[in-house]
Image: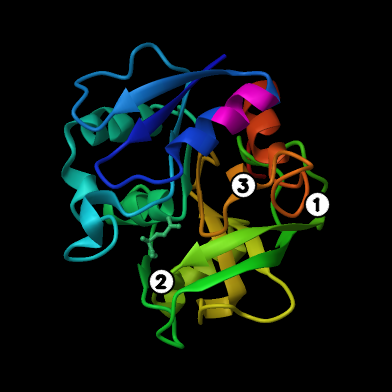
Amino acid sequence: MKVGVVTFPGSLDDGDARRAVTLAGGEAVALWHADADLRGVDAVVLPGGFSYGDYLRCGAIARFAPVMSEVVRAAEGGMPVLGICNGFQVLCESHLLPGALVRNDHQKFVCTDQRLRVEQTGTAWTSSFTAGQEITIPLKNGEGGFVADAATLDRLEGEGRVVFRYLDGNPNGSLRDIAGISNERGNVVGLMPHPEHAVEELFGPGLDGLGLFTSVLSAGLGAIA
Ligand SMILES: NC(=O)CC[C@H](N)C(=O)O
């Protein structure tokens, strides 16, 4: 299975995302922000970093990159798409996911190993986990506070689209401790913490991040009940 990883000017974690795909057993394909097509990939990762220098708002300019037209089209057709941190911000800016990421409530950049609960295993990116599994992966962001209006939050909860929730304290002021969400179909997932930094014993807090990448390789599409 070919998993494309998009590099925008200012991306930081694209290399680690490609490495995570390879370690999970997939074929990583480098995609460039100016690409006009997706080079035949079966899934796409939008990696973390500081696309276009975080000008305007994180992810606000990347949304207009040429490759994003194809990513949006493919996602709407059911292709699995994962947005990690800056990638999550790009997915919200692109309206593939609802809500927005705003500046951390304490106004500081946060960098820590973060415990999470996997709330939803019926997505393309979480089928390798068990429901309620608690994992630890790195978190590092300045604009990681997930916000949405109350009706949207209720809909996300009611439809089982809260995929990851922060444990042991809320690191950024995200409403309802939400760390990651999916679209209705479960093929598009965004999360603030970084699974691609927890895929090898010698680096990061362990192997808990690998499950997202093995999920998409094994799954086909999960379906949210
Ligand atoms: N690690 C990241 O992807 C950071 C995303 C974004 N630049 C922020 O600071 O919020």
Segment tinted magenta in the rendering: 19-23
Instruction: Please tell me whether residue 177 belongs to the stretch shown in magenta.
Output: no
Please, which colouring scheme is shown?
A: rainbow
Position in image of residue 39 (x %, y %)? 34, 13
Position in image of residue 210 (x %, y %)? 70, 38
In the picture, measured across the screen, residue 1 lies left or right of residue 70, that is right
Position in image of residue 22 (x %, y %)? 61, 22
- Sequence-first tag of 2 and 1: 1
Disc 1 to disc 3, how far (Cα)?
22 Å
State yes or no: Cβ of the residue under disc 3 lies below 8 Å from any atom of ligand 1.
no
- Sequence-first tag of 1 and 3: 1
Characterize the magenta stretch by its predominant secondary structure.
helix
Q: Residues within 10 Å of mark 1 (few under 14, many from 20)?
A: some
Which is more toward the observer, 81 or 182? Answer: 81
| Residue underneath mark 2 | 142
Q: Residues within 10 Å of mark 3 (few under 14, many from 20)?
A: many
* Mark 1 and mark 3 residues within 8 Å of each other at the beta carbon: no
* Mark 2 and mark 3 residues within 8 Å of each other at the beta carbon: no
Q: Mark 3 belongs to which amino acid?
A: His
Q: Quadrant of the N terminus?
A: top right
| Residue underneath mark 1 | 131
- Residue 166 in view: yes
Query: What residue is at 36 percent from the left and 57 percent from the top?
Result: 89
| Residue underneath mark 3 | 197
Q: Which mark is residue 100?
A: none
